[in-house]
Image (cartoon, coloured by chain):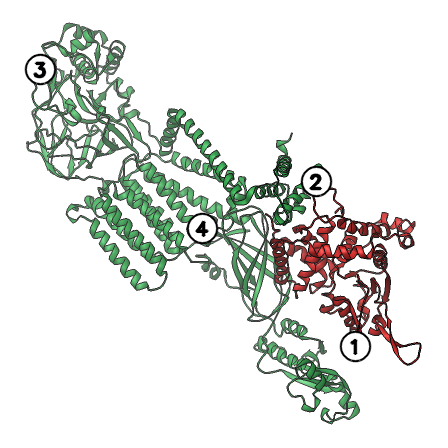
């Protein structure tokens, strides 16, 4: 029966790290941490399974040792085991006799199928005759977190363990038959018969020495007398003595003394019949078996036994190689964490150097000089912490999450590196590394995160496995079977599928916890104007470019997009690049709105002059602006915006924001837009909490025609220049419900207008909407949005134009939406009485708030993978082809190397052995015996091959001959072909 | 195992590899079945060693010895071991000469090419020890005068492992001087039919023509001594010896003399297979018969010893290129 034997020391730290990572996932709402957690769960399951799998592949067949021993001797125990499934896990065997562990050691050669024998140096069990032994064998699989145990009771040739001869003897009754019969009083008279010679014993008379033999043998030899032979010693053994072992020792003393004196010896228990003892072996056997009293040993209670099952690992030693792997595994997440926090190569190099010092000190000192090691560790950690922490940046609790906590964590991990001298501390180190990985997965949002996570995960995996191994594997099991490789590949695929399955039921996190909403400014660049727009460098931004020829001011907002200034000429778009501008961590895609425009003069939209209410941060409650509706029980929608370039002081947010976290003052404008009194430099982040309106097509349609409800005049105002055909078109497209009208307008636009970023600019004085709808019929989002808004306004529907960013990509690993400069966008917002402002846009694929699907992390990842495969099919095929070529090349090289190392006959010999082993031969037998495993038609061929191979190896007059080589190689090929499994033959 | 390989590439000195086959064939014509044991006996003769046969009476031990003698064309004599047999009964003694005054040496039954010492363990330790000199040196010393026994000299001793009462178990020093030990075992039913019908057995002995002359055998022994043994194979033999010493159920492992016998026997096998070099299989084949009687194990059962030897062999990987 297989049962868990206990956790490996330090495994609980890994479990604790998993829970800590779960807390990080809750606090940051990062998808990547969820992925890390899922991988962690799968690794734990694998750790369980690999142990049980490995332990079932090992069977202990027999235990052998000597037949007799004395208490306290060293004893060699031969453990004969049979490996039915090769494993690279290390198996530890423990031999117990009568509940005492007498030997324990590692089982050798577990990587090869077949019987293997291990010699374990051990001790003797207690006095007695033992014929059954309990063998427990343990393994923790390749990962080594949970130890599993199997137990077997094996019978073995009885082992008689004799006591050590006591200092004093037992009671002895001596008698001499000859003396009593002949009346001869002693050997001093020398009257009894001489019966041969024997070596000298203490107490012999000098005149008994037999000089001729003494001279010949060069040791003292005396004449042996008949009388001595007939002396009879009867040793009395007693039952019920308080110390049975001592009594047995006393008996042994007397029996051996009697034998040494040449007497006939026997022993009797109490008044029983005397039992004759012939030689020393008899003495040990009798003393081992002597049982003076019933044993009164009691079994421990179950709770006492359970208390011992806490931790189990036979050894605590850590190889230097493992120590350095642990350091490398710890360094990876540090690089991963410090890079995006704004630290340069110098800082990272200093931390890595501290790691290396820790590894070097702990692996060279080991357990010696512990206080010195700890002192050096504390000093190094303090130096690293002092170097990294920037005290001035820590202005609030939220800032400390970014400017204090990670640095302290790094310093702590550096300090832990000095403590890492055994397996337990190595696993604790790895837990710290895993925690840092989770932390950086929570902090990072860039696209490098995925590859970094893979590197960090592999590092942790390799280090974890290396910590588990006692020795470098002598015979790597990788070489011996292709099946092992296939099993590993299949295992990897199953594990990956397991991760995806777990993730498939985990929804995309809704966002960070309220406590830890991220918000920081990389640099404080105040603006000059009171609530006015400012360009990214902080200077005022007065207005956008105009297609009327008169340039009002600069070219506009971020990346030159005219929509991020106080006026927007609908005919200009600007030259927008591909660079990433914003990363937004949010569960759904939405319009990231920056500005709203209500006034239109026929060519240019402009914002209201009202700068609105000022609120002081860092936590801003946003009051609803005109047209916003307070929806009871609305979904909160948390978005964290990460500025990837310098941005103006526009606060982008999904409609309708209720709370903004930004450490600066905000102007909450009446038109719903938000502006800060600082600009947002690259690397800054802020968080917005919005209410999601929950608008659905059904609900919007139910509002009917909203024109009849009336609205403020500025929201339905159309410019003088609006042409009649525009108005007619609007009336023509009008439907009973406003929602359908909007759809009809979008439908008409998609059928009659082409999307074109190079649309012609209308001539000075023309109405831009008319020019777009009926003359050029070419345009982009600003014109589409403007035309829709003007047509809706002409029907009496309150509408306005908003500008901002739409998400174009999703980074599924980091769980962020990516907006590039060219994703700057303009769209229509229509005010519905039931839900407030709703954004409409035929060109961006953003669903209505109430219709967005809630996806899961696994679903997202699976979609990403399938999209990646279908998008890059050709490239993947090319890579596969390249990998195939590389593999073929590697095999070629390996074969060439083998040939160089082993010679051509050596290679042939290896192939012959492999073919024979496939047929069931044992790899240790000679070539001739291997040849015998081939069936009838092949026997002769195999015999000749075996003889030739032996000749090439052992004949001193051997000359290499190409013809013979070709002939033998052909025979080996035949043997190989016919020794493949049967499916290849038919 | 075929004694004569048809391969023309194998490079043993011409003629010698056929002697082994011829001797084995001759003995096989007498003794039904038991070909492997016959080949071990032949190899033992070619290697210049002495043979110990452990088996129950009536399985053909004497016939095997007589067949060996006949096939090499040598003289044969036989000694029956009893507890009152004295050394002089075996090696010979001084007897009054015809003139009645001087003494001359009267050779004992040891003075033959093939000597069968039946039931060696029934004779006392003194007589057993008297064999040591002749086995090691091929010489007999009586009253200070040394007499060489005929060369080649092969002593074939038998002992009955079943009936142990009243015997003098062979000392380790004596058993160690036998190069190989075999157990003939029972013939199969078909083989017994051959014996009972007279197609095999003692009555064919008279018609046996010698397969080789004594000179051939002497030459062949010289060839066997010259067979090349690679260091790797010698190392293999040593590893096997070490394995027997480290085996938990062996009280006393094989000695270095055992290793010498093992290699000599393997060399003879190589020559019988037409090779002038030893291959690992020769060692593996020789180990069974060269080591079995030398191991001291708690049980006197030959099958136990064989099983232990097989384990030792399996634990040592055979050398290869």
Q: Are discs 4 and 3 located on one and the same chain? A: yes
The answer to whether the residues at label 3 and label 1 have Cβ atoms under 8 Å apart is: no
The answer to whether the residues at label 2 and label 1 have Cβ atoms under 8 Å apart is: no
Q: Are discs 2 and 1 located on one and the same chain? A: no
Residue A29 position, x and y percent, is 29, 38
In the image, taking residue A560 as reference, residue A433 lies left or right, namely right
The letter of the green chain is A
Mark 4 and mark 3: Cα distance apart in space = 75 Å
Whether A900 is drawn above or below A740: the answer is below
Judge depth for marks 3 and 2 and give the one in front. Answer: 2
At numbered mark 3, what does the secondary structure look like: helix, strand or loop?
loop
The answer to whether the residues at label 4 and label 1 have Cβ atoms under 8 Å apart is: no
Dot 2 corresponds to which residue?
Answer: A939
Name which quarter of the figure residue B231 lies in: bottom right
Judge depth for marks 4 and 3 and give the one in front. Answer: 3
* Numbered mark located on residue A549 in the image: 3
**Which residue is at a point 27% across and 30% down the rendered structure image?**
A817
The answer to whether the residues at label 2 and label 4 have Cβ atoms under 8 Å apart is: no
Check the picture and name the quadrant holding the C terminus of chain A. Answer: top right
Question: Upstream in the sequence, badge 4 or badge 3?
Answer: 4
* Numbered mark located on residue B144 in the image: 1
Give the colour of chain B: red
Judge depth for marks 2 and 1 and give the one in front. Answer: 1
Judge depth for marks 2 and 4 and give the one in front. Answer: 2
Task: Mark 4: give few (<14), some (14-19) or many (20+) Cα within 10 Å.
Answer: many
Residue B84 position, x and y percent, is 85, 74
Task: Mark 3: give few (<14), some (14-19) or many (20+) Cα within 10 Å.
Answer: few
Q: Are discs 3 and 2 located on one and the same chain? A: yes
At numbered mark 4, what does the secondary structure look like: helix, strand or loop?
loop
Please tell me which residue lies in front, A102 or A128.
A102
């Amino acid at each position: 029966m297989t049962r868990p034997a206990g956790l490996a020391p330090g495994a609980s730290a890994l479990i604790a790290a998993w829970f800590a990572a779960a807390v990080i996932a809750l606090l940051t709402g990062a998808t990547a941490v969820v992925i890390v957690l899922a991988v962690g769960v799968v690794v734990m399951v694998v750790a369980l399974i690999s142990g049980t799998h490995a332990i079932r592949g090992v069977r202990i067949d027999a235990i052998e040792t000597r037949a007799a021993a004395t208490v306290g001797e060293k004893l060699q125990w031969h453990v004969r085991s049979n490996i039915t499934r090769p494993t690279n896990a290390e198996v530890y065997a423990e031999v117990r006799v009568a509940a005492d562990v007498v030997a324990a050691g590692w089982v050798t050669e577990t990587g090869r199928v077949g019987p293997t024998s291990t010699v374990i140096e051990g001790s003797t069990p207690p006095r007695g005759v033992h014929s059954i032994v309990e063998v427990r064998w343990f393994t923790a699989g390749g990962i080594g977190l949970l130890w599993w145990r199997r137990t077997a009771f094996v019978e073995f040739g009885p082992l008689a363990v004799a006591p050590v001869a006591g200092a004093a003897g037992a009671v002895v009754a001596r008698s001499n038959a000859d003396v009593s019969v002949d009346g001869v009083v002693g050997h001093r008279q020398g009257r009894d018969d001489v019966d041969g010679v024997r070596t000298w014993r203490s107490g012999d008379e000098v005149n008994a020495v037999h000089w001729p033999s003494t001279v010949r043998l060069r040791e003292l030899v005396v004449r042996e007398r008949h009388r001595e032979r007939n002396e009879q010693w009867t040793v009395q053994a007693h039952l019920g003595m308080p110390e049975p072992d001592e009594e047995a020792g006393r008996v042994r003393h007397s029996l051996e003394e009697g034998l040494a004196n040449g007497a006939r010896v026997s022993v009797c228990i109490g008044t029983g019949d005397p039992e004759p003892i012939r030689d020393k072996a008899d003495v040990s056997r009798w003393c081992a078996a002597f049982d003076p009293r019933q044993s009164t040993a009691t079994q421990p209670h179950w709770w006492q036994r359970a208390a011992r099952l806490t931790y189990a690992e036979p050894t605590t030693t850590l190889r230097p190689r493992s120590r350095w792997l642990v350091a490398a595994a710890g360094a990876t997440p540090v690089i991963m964490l410090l890079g995006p926090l704004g630290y340069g190569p110098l800082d990272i190099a200093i931390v890595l150097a501290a790691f290396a010092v820790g590894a070097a000190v702990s692996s060279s000192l080991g357990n010696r000089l512990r206080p010195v090691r700890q002192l050096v560790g504390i000093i190094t950690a303090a130096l690293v912490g002092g170097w990294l922490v920037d005290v001035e940046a820590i202005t609030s609790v939220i800032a400390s999450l970014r400017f204090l906590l990670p640095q302290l964590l790094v310093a702590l991990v550096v300090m832990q590196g000095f403590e890492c001298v055994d397996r337990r501390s190595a696993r604790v180190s790895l837990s710290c590394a895993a925690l840092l990985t989770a932390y950086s997965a929570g902090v990072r949002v860039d696209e490098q995160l995925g590859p970094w996570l893979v590197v960090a995960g592999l590092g942790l995996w390799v280090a974890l496995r290396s910590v588990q191994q006692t020795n470098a594997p002598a015979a790597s099991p990788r070489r011996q079977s292709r099946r092992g490789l296939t099993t590993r590949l299949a295992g990897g695929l199953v594990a990956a599928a397991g991760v995806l399955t777990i993730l498939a039921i985990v929804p995309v996190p809704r966002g960070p916890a309220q406590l830890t909403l991220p918000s920081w400014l990389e640099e404080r660049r105040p603006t000059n104007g009171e609530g006015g727009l400012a360009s990214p460098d902080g200077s005022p931004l007065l207005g956008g470019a105009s297609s009327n020829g008169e340039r009002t001011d600069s070219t506009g907002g971020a990346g030159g997009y005219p929509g991020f200034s106080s006026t927007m000429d609908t005919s200009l778009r600007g030259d927008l690049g591909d660079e990433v501008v914003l990363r937004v961590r949010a569960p759904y895609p939405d319009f990231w709105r920056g500005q709203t425009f209500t006034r239109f003069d026929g060519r240019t939209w402009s914002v209201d002059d009202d700068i609105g209410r000022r609120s002081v941060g860092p936590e801003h409650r946003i009051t609803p602006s005109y047209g916003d509706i307070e929806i009871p029980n609305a979904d909160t929608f948390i978005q964290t915006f990460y500025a990837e370039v310098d941005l103006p002081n526009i606060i982008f947010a999904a409609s309708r924001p209720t709370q903004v976290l930004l450490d600066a003052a905000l102007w909450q404008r009446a038109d719903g837009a938000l502006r800060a009194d600082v600009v947002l430099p690259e690397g800054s982040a802020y968080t917005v909490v919005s209410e999601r309106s929950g608008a659905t097509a059904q609900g919007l349609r139910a509002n009917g025609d909203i024109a009849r409800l009336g609205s403020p005049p500025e929201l339905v105002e159309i410019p003088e220049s609006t042409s009649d055909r525009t108005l007619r078109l609007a009336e023509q497209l009008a439907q009973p419900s406003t929602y359908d009208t909007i759809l009809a307008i979008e439908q008409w636009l998609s059928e009659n207008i082409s999307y074109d970023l190079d649309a012609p600019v209308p001539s000075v004085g023309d109405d831009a909407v008319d020019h777009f709808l009926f003359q050029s019929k070419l345009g982009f989002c600003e014109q589409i949005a403007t035309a829709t808004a003007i047509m809706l306004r002409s029907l009496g529907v309150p509408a306005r134009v908003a500008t901002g960013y739409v998400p174009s990509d999703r980074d599924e690993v980091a769980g962020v939406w990516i907006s590039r400069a060219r994703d700057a966008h303009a769209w229509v917002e229509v005010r519905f009485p039931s839900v407030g402002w709703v954004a409409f846009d035929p060109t961006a694929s953003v669903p209505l708030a109430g219709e967005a699907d809630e996806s899961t992390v696994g679903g997202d990842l699976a979609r990403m993978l399938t999209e990646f495969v279908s998008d890059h099919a050709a490239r993947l095929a090319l890579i596969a082809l390249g990998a195939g070529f590389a593999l073929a090349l590697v095999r070629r090289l390996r074969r060439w190397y083998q040939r160089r190392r082993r010679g051509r006959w050596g290679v042939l010999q290896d192939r012959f052995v492999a073919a024979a082993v496939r047929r069931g031969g044992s790899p240790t037998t000679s070539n001739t015996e291997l040849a015998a495993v081939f069936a009838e038609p092949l026997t002769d061929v195999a015999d000749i091959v075996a003889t030739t191979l032996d000749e090439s190896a052992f004949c001193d007059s051997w000359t290499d001959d190409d013809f013979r080589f070709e002939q033998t190689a052909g025979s080996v090929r035949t043997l190989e072909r016919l020794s493949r499994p049967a499916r290849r033959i038919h | 195992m075929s004694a004569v390989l048809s391969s023309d590439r194998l490079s043993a000195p011409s003629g010698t590899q056929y002697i082994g086959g011829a001797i084995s064939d001759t003995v096989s014509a007498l003794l039904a079945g038991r070909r492997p044991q016959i080949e071990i006996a032949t190899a033992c003769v070619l290697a210049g060693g002495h043979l110990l046969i452990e088996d129950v009476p009536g399985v053909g031990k004497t016939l095997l010895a007589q067949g060996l003698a006949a096939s090499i064309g040598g003289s044969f004599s036989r000694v029956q071991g009893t507890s009152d047999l004295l050394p002089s009964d075996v090696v010979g003694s001084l007897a009054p000469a015809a003139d009645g005054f001087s003494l001359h040496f009267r050779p004992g039954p040891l003075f033959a090419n093939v000597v069968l010492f039946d039931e060696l363990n029934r004779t006392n330790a003194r007589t057993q020890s008297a064999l040591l000199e002749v086995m090691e040196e091929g010489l007999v010393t009586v009253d200070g005068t040394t007499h060489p026994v005929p060369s080649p000299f092969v002593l074939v001793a038998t002992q009955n492992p079943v009936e142990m009462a009243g015997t003098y178990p062979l000392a380790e020093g004596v058993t160690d001087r036998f190069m190989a030990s075999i157990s003939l075992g029972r013939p199969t039913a078909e083989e017994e039919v051959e014996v009972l019908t007279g197609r095999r057995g003692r009555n064919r002995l008279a018609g046996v023509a010698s397969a080789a002359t004594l000179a051939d055998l002497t030459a062949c022994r010289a060839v066997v001594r010259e067979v090349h043994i690679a260091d790797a194979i010698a190392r293999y033999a040593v590893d096997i010896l070490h394995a027997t010493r480290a085996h938990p159920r062996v009280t006393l492992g094989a000695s270095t003399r055992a290793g010498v016998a093992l290699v000599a026997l393997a060399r003879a096998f190589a020559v019988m297979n037409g090779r002038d070099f030893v291959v690992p299989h020769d060692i593996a084949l020789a180990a069974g018969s060269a080591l079995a009687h030398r191991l001291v194990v708690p049980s006197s059962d030959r099958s136990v010893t064989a099983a232990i030897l097989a384990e030792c062999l399996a634990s040592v990987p055979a050398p290869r290129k």
